[in-house]
Image: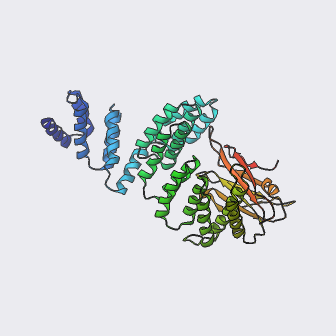
Amino acid sequence: MPLRRGAWWTRLTQNDASSVYVQAKRQCELSTWTDRRALLELMLLYQADGVARVDLAARLGLLGEPDAAALLRREAVRRVRSPEELTNVRRALLGSERYPGSLFEDKYKAAPSDQERLAVVRRFLELAPHDSRLRRRHLALLEALNRPAEILELARELRSDPFADALLLADAASALHRTGADLEAHRTFGELSERAPKDPWVRGLLGDRLRSEGWFDEATEAYATLEELVPDDARATLRSALAHAGAGRLDIAERLLTRVARTGGRGQSGELGELSRQLGRILAEAALSSTSRKPSSEEASRLHRLAGDLAQAEQSTIVLVQAEAGAPELKVRLAGAGADKSLHEPDVAAPSLGLYLFRTSAAETPQTLVERLSIASPSELVPTRPLRVRVDALPPNGDGALFTRELTLPSDGKVLALAP
């Protein structure tokens, strides 16, 4: 091996690296993978630049050496020395992946079944194997066709792909959870925190998606790290409060919401403070009216006091629309009363939290107000999981009970009107 390595290095300094590899293989110098790996290591040393390594991998792929090309691509990413080089390597790897998006949509929509849609997606993945949209469609179709083994294999590929984006990894983890592969789902969710341990956006996304799957304790841990990264941030505290409320720790959730309602967080945001105040009222009223878990007399007394304190002589009926955690931004409007048919924007909107708040006249009943709402989610290709939304309407303190309605939004982007 030392003699062969010396001969290979001499050839690399005198010829193109791809031709050296092919020539060595033709001369039976690469009979085992150990031999091939040794030559590839020399080629990586000779080509010190990441982009040059990617170009070399492309030439080997064209010469019919896919295994060698795959190793060079993987090592080109692993051995980058700076963020700038990583950006250049990513551009070199993905820049040639192009596909006609309009043609894809036409063929996809023309396919009569999920099986044929899957065939369309796989054909276009040959052109752009790293495209997030195609991979997301691939994942959704495998789930719709009930192929858990293929979902598991795809999730493993995504975890090993350094260019798989955070949303795609989260979608794969959610699909694994729905198929019952909880261990693999946790491992895929964990990949998010391992790849970006200091990124607040990723921590927020991780907590949101864990909360959406009903893993409230794990979501609380993710939000705890988020609060360390952005101390006293109102949105981070709101997220943590929702996770504690989902886990049944209503006392902790109410304390967090009360803190944001009074201070607005480090940004002293009046809108987020108002959102926290009304959310705290709704959680307290929902606990008081719950039929599944009746609060004790002491707890009921505390919740009544809390709801009264947060009401602050409220004169308006409020309507709060709450999308499931990690949902895309919704288009939520409230129609005017009577002859006024104009659509009004939310008084407070926090799309990243999935919360939209309206304040209206106290003369109308909560149910009437809710029926004036219209909600739409972004249009998606089928199959797509339906998006769940909860609407709460609360009159001024002491003027009536909390009205709650749970909805499922259509995935075609059409407006869902709540009026009967």
Q: Can you name the residue that lies furthest to the right here?
A: 339
Res 315 quadrant in image: bottom right
Q: Residue at x 62, y 58 (%)?
A: 250
Residue drawn 37% across the image and 49% down it = 89
In this image, 119 relative to 405: left or right? left
Type of colouring: rainbow
Residue 348: tell me if it is visible. Answer: no
- Residue 233 is situated, as x and y percent measured from the top left of the image, at 54, 66
Observer-nearest of 48 and 373: 373
Q: Which residue is at the front of the view, 307 or 126? A: 307
Residue closest to the eye, 246 or 176 = 246
The mark total stands at 0
In x, y percent, where is residue 181?
A: 50, 37
Task: List x then y, in percent, for residue 414.
Answer: 71, 46
**Outermost residue toward the front in this view:** 297
Q: Residue furthest left?
A: 3
Instruction: Give residue 268's quadrant in the image.
Output: bottom right
Q: Quadrant of residue 119?
A: top right
* Residue closest to the eye, 293 or 152: 293
Which quadrant is home to the N terminus?
A: top left
| Residue 322 seen by the camera | yes
Q: Position of residue 273 (x, y in %)?
A: 63, 68
Against 249, is 149 above or below? above
Side (left or right) of 58 relative to 285: left
Residue 173 drawn above or below residue 295: above
